Image (cartoon, helix red, strand yellow):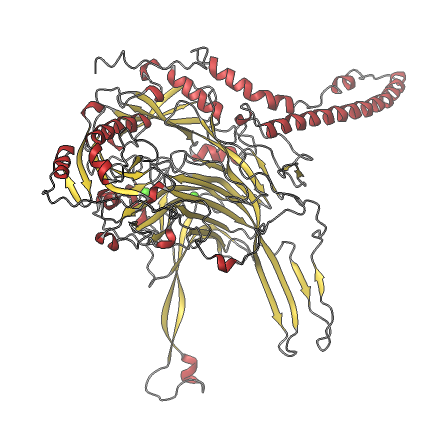
Amino acid sequence: MPGFQDKFRAFSPAASPSKEKSGPVEGSQAETDIDSSKLASTNGQGNGKAVEHLSYDTSEDRRLLKRSRAQLWVWRCISYLLLAALIGLAVSLALVLGDRRTLRRENTDFRNTTLYAERNTCPRFLDNGQAVLESDRVPSSSQPNLFEELTVPEMAAVRNYLFSQSDLNLTRSDEATPASNVIYLLELLPPPKSPALAFLDSGGAVPPPPRQARAVLYLGYMEDPKVVELTVGPLPNPTNYTILREVPWNTRPPNSAEYAAMDAVVQAASAQLEQFMVQSFAGFKYYNCEFPRCLLWGDSTPRGLTTDQRQTWIWFMRFSDGYYLKPIGLEFLVDHRGNNASNWSVIQIFYNGQVFANTTELNTAFMDTTSGLNRQQLRMPLPGEINYASLKRQPGTGRPEARGNAAPQAGTRQYEPSGKRYSIDRNAISYMGWTFQVSVRPSGGIRIWDVRFGGERIAYEIALQEAMISKGGATPSQSLDQAYDTANGLGSSFHELVQGVDCPFHASYLDTAAYVDRDSPLLHPQSICVWEQDTGRPLWRHYTQEFAAKGSFIQYGGVVDHALVIRGITTVYNTDYMTDFVFHLNGEIQVSVSLSGYMLAAPWNGATLNYSYPLYVDMGASVQDHFLNWKVDLDIKGTENSVRQDFIEVEARPLPWSVAGANGPSNGTAAPVTVQKRLRHVLPETEEDASIAYDLRRPVVTSIINERSANKWGTPQGYQIQVDSVISQLYPDSWQPAKSGAWSRYQIATTVRRDNESSSSSIYAAAHPGVPPQPMNFSSYLNGESVRNTDIVNWVTVGAYDVPTSESAPVTAVTGRQLSFWLRPYNYFDRGAATDLYAITVMSPTNYTRRAQPKYETYGVPTEFSCVPSKDPAPFNRTEFSAYL
Ligand SMILES: [Ca+2]
Ligand SMILES: [Ca+2]
């Protein structure tokens, strides 16, 4: 494509003084390591040589040696004392430096994605109420953990390396057009499982596999534009790249350059419709608007049903608080095929239930009062009327009479009376026998790795794969909308969490960073939170009654259900996905996503009733469903696992004892039978047989077992996968927009684990769902392979339907919308794994006829509190910022 060469120059980053391979990269790395080298400067040396010099062998020498040894002992003591003092000083220095780093949060701070490691100590409470550990604070490791996402310096190094490759001809994102070669996304390419396990299980004897990045490039500058994914490595100083895969151009998520070019098309059409907009929408318009009478637009997917198409329905809404609830009923179909934006145009217009081929046709119908146009007047809020879409407190709405008239009071808090019982080292977390790593995949979502309980690996990876939403509605954008939110930023839209609301005040926080559709990493401070929670329930309890003496008892025993929660919230346009991993003390993990945020509204008319209840005078929404898919790679006692299905069935069983005995029916006409439940144990052989599409009439418990590892009772050890939020895919297999969600046909699908089948979905699933070639084509994963005694992975689907009601405005509440599954020990232990905890046991009174005081046993758990905060910290400390390296 001649002519474009001069227009789009290659980017030479201002922050990169040299294009030599090691220049900018080493500079970044050296800065990163400064803190850690200062903090880890005490590795005692110096006594070894003195001992070496005292190698005498005569008797005189022996006396001298003895004396020297005595002296040496004294000097050694002094040395140790000095060394201890030195260590103390160094630790103090480290704490001071660490304190400054933590509290000042200057721009150099973000290189270390963890603020501090936390031990079992009482935090210090600052004047602002924030809890800061200092008594046993240690610096986090200087090197990234195996599964840690790319660090900011690594992202910068990969970017600098790619821009130094002249054959890629890259353009800065902020200077790009759809006809440019740009970096769209950078993320960690996790190591293959085999070398990763070799490293993890060697205790440090085997080196870790090299860290590599996955780079997604949009090559719009090519004659035949396409998307390529590259493997770039090794980190932190990349020296080579290879092509991982090529992806059809039209399946890519739009980047900001494409959206800017689409916007120019929308602006041009809006300019032609200016008078129509002003008169139809109470003065609101898009082109050349004046606040507060401005519109904005959103888009929808799919972008056509074949890969040669790229056309998107966009819809307008009023630009004010809660704009997702303020659509105006005007939609454009924008054709944005290819990489030459000058060919793009609006090819259809939808207005108030009518369709027009272009702006001229709509203008003509609008100007002609006899055209029969169904004109719509946008209803504006009346003076004094509440903004139904606002998130601000609105006294007089809701049920104030139910809450009493008292002055505002602080709600309940939790605190940690004996200090924190978990620790954090970068992304590695340990808690009461649990250890794991947490990371956020920009092209997918939050995930945890190498999950162990009591030192034994339970899961290699538990990772959110996709969040799919399909709607029904009366407008084109809602009628066709099938959203696959990985394409919309499910893994890159984490923002700072608000203390005391998003997470409890006593939570700790991790930072995340993402490199998506921009020229530098974007840091999201405090975007993952970690805390120990008292769930407010006993984990187990029993009250043993003394039936003979009514009102008395024999024994009570119970344990509090304490659990560690890891939470990240990602906001994809209107929807907030709150993901929790909850680690309980009996070896169970609950994984859930709670939904909040705005519904996507639609103007209310007769047709809308089929899809919604009214949310407001003139507004409805659209019925929709949420399907979430998780990758669950359990490794039970090793990687060679099988699936066990325990079907719960009913049998009619003859009662031989009744025939022979006196207790059964005795009419003598037929052998008596009983109808009862029974278990049918199945070890399915193939992927298809091991995949469960739930049928309420055929209940089944699915567990992952190791056939060769038994518990004390001879039963193969396993973990159950229990899906709480069962949803059924209603669309037929033939419906194209749902095809990228082939995983949604099962609650639990099982496949042989393969490194190249790493995900059930991808950022390319949305544009042309199910149209091959898709990089992650789930429907090809189930291909008859054996799932006995091999490394298997499960794909777990949870979901819920959304029926919009008046309570859906302004935003939906998370209550009742927690979509979860559990991983539960299934003959894994020899008995309940929480019976070694410090339970409270109350022994029964010795004399049942008199009211004797019960004897309590708390097994030494302190009842004196030392770590009680006196005030709340500020809920919102910092804002995200670009890390321009
Ligand atoms: Ca496995
Ligand atoms: Ca397979």
Q: Quadrant of the N terminus?
A: top left
Residue found at x 36% / y 71%:
651
State which quadrant residue 94 falls in: top right
Q: Is residue 315 above or below residue 229?
A: below
801 displayed left or right of 705: left
State which quadrant residue 242 falls in: top left
Task: Let me know if residue 105 appears in the view.
Answer: yes
Task: Let me know if residue 750 appears in the view.
Answer: no
Q: Residue at the far left: name it.
A: 370
The location of residue 483, given as percent across then percent down, is 30, 42
Q: Quadrant of ligand 2?
A: top left
Q: Is residue 876 above or below residue 548?
A: above
Q: Nearer the viewer, residue 776 or 385?
A: 385
The location of residue 177, given as percent across then percent down, is 28, 22
Q: Residue at the far bottom: name it.
A: 667
The location of residue 486, given as percent across then percent down, is 35, 38
34 displayed left or right of 849: left
The location of residue 230, given as percent across then percent down, is 35, 25
Q: Is residue 699 above or below residue 453?
A: below
Q: How many marks?
A: 0
